Amino acid sequence: MKESFKAFSTTDLSRRSGDVVAAALRGPVLLTQHKKARLVVLSVEEYEHRSARKAPDTRTVAKLSDMPDGLADDFREAAAAYMEGEEG
């Protein structure tokens, strides 16, 4: 779902900062510069709400050479079996 933003230019920001702040308190505001999207302004409440809904990424990266031998062998076998299934 694409979110719609109230948009202002950076010139608007300098000339109508009160309007920009008022709009940001109602919802996300897109700031443009030379007709290109540059920044998004959010209220503190909106930022905290958006930050809180994301679960932290607990994934890790490892090399096969860092894995215990048995686990690395199991992974290699599973990968080989998967690749054979892709070819056949």
Image (spheres, rainbow, N blue to C red):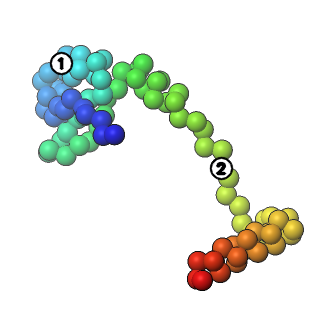
The span from disc 2 to disc 1 (Cα, nearest Å) is 42 Å
Determine the image quadrant of residue 42.
top left
Q: Is residue 29 above or below residue 80?
A: above
Q: Nearer the viewer, residue 49 or 9?
A: 49
Q: Does dot 2 land on a helix, a strand or a loop?
A: loop
The answer to whether residue 54 is left or right of residue 21 is right
Viewer-nearest of discs 2 and 1: 2
Which residue is labeled 1 in the image? 19
The answer to whether residue 71 is left or right of residue 36 is right
Q: Amino acid at mark 2?
A: Arg
Residue name at image x 71 percent, y 61 percent = 62
Determine the image quadrant of residue 72.
bottom right
Residue 84 position in % (x across, y down): 65, 81
Q: Nearer the viewer, residue 51 or 1?
A: 1
Residue name at image x 30 percent, y 40 percent = 2
Q: Quadrant of the C terminus?
A: bottom right
Residue 51 position in % (x across, y down): 49, 30
Which residue is labeled 2 in the image? 59
Q: Look at the numbered discs 2 and 1 and tell me whether their residues touch, using CB distance below 8 Å.
A: no
Q: Earlier in the sequence, mark 2 or mark 1?
A: 1
Label ID, residue 49: none
Q: Amino acid at mark 1?
A: Asp
Determine the image quadrant of residue 11.
top left
